[in-house]
Amino acid sequence: MVLSRHNIMGRLKGSERFFIINPLSRSADLLEPEAARQLAGGVYGNLPDLASKGYLVDPEEEATRYRAAYLDFLDARDKSQTQLFFVPWYSCNFSCPYCYQEGYGNKHGSLEDGVMDAFFQYVEKEFAAAPVYLTLFGGEPLLPGESARRSIAGFLDRAADRDLGVAVVTNGYTLPDYLEILQRASIREIQVTLDGVGAVHDRRRPLHDGSPTFQRVVEGITQSLQRGFPVNLRVVLDKENVDSLPELALFARDMGWTASPIFKTQLGSNYELHTCQADSGRLFSRVELYEKLLEMIAKHPEILELHKPAFSLSKFLWENGELPTPLFDSCPGCKTEWAFDFTGRIYACTATVGKEGEELGTFHPLVGRREGLIREWQERDVTSIAQCRDCSLQLACGGGCAAVARNHAGNLRAPDCRPVKELLEMGMSLYFGKEET
Amino acid sequence: MKSLIRPKKTAGKEVAQCCAKISPVVAGCHD
């Protein structure tokens, strides 16, 4: 018997206690320092249950369990819903300095009915057997003006005719004007971004002419919740606005948003996806961002009312009392996610949609797929990325984002490593720091 | 050594997890 290659051991940040987690056997334990020392030194005698918990294994048996878990993962993914993004245009009424689509071509153009019809025909044919839902994406899909409203209404009517649920990713500025139209379809979720309260948000997410947007976005969120539309509030963080997060948490509480069962949040980081940003000094690395969040949560626990950060597997373990199933692949591109745009092109995901050279095919005017490229996306997971194979973190990390990996390494079969151990050390401290051992 | 895995108890929790799984994550997987 040997230690499992999937054991992840670390120390709770700011504590003398340790943890051991095994994403394959789905075991998780807190360890006193002496036990951690024994394990690290290869002394197992005094520690009970190491084998039954999968920390100590027969390598061949573990390889069999790994293969079985991989097949279960593929099976579950085959049965899960596929998210189809649709970009009606890349135009946007905002001028956010950190926009990752800045510099894309195709900024101008409008959605023709024929393209929309071709999209729905493609969905009906190619995804006939799969449960799917649609997500309107941009640019900004809810642009002001009658022409945009007519196009979006046409899209929603076509979705409703086919009983397809729709999510919307919007900057939220025109939401109040679109709520009536959105009721034409079954709206699963509206994602809106607020980067802070008042001037903090306005500085980062102004209209093209520099006008503020905060008040309109806030009205949009409140009215969406009143209509029963689930809202997913996204906050994009970097060094410029992170200190205003406690203020945003209190604002969301005062607005009554955080008390709503249909309100949820996500913290996004501002990062360099395809191109360098003018002021890259303000960007956080993943570890830096979460270190900052942990530090801020200690001083401002109200942040947790707005958002409980995942810290890799930590939050899931704390909320569910179990670990999630092993993550053999964290990239949904060409598997449970596709993206389509108004020019008739097909892409893998939101990170690549609209970027020149990333097209994987067309659905209009002719249907064509670059099957070789699509297969590359579909075959990418921790079993096919060489650097992942011997990594003990692979089943918690899942290999990261394929688009980011390729930007760095030049090919898809490269990892976009997540700092799993560091995140666990922080998250286990936050969520389990008060547990008795 | 203290396990952090809780014994499974109610059917209610299973339903809750199932619901959580179908809740969409709109964008952001490359964060």
Image (cartoon, helix red, strand yellow):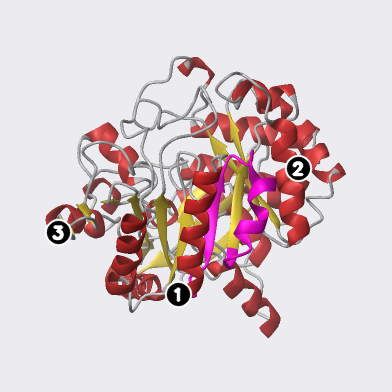
Q: Are tags 1 and 3 found on a single chain?
A: yes
Query: Which residue is painted at 34% across and 44% down in the image?
Result: A353
Q: Is residue A343 above or below residue A122?
A: above
- Helix, strand or loop status at disc 2: helix
What whole-number distance in Å separates the C-alpha atoms at marks 3 and 2? 45 Å
- Helix, strand or loop status at disc 1: loop
Q: Residues within 10 Å of mark 2 (few under 14, many from 20)?
A: some
- The answer to whether one can see residue A299 in this image is yes
User: Which label number is shown at residue A219?
Assistant: 2
- Helix, strand or loop status at disc 3: helix
Q: Which residues are magenta?
A: A162-187
User: Which label number is shown at residue A162?
Assistant: 1
Q: Position of residue A188 (x, y in %)?
A: 58, 63
Q: Residues within 10 Å of mark 3 (few under 14, many from 20)?
A: few
The amino acid type found where label 2 is placed reads Glu
The amino acid type found where label 1 is placed reads Arg
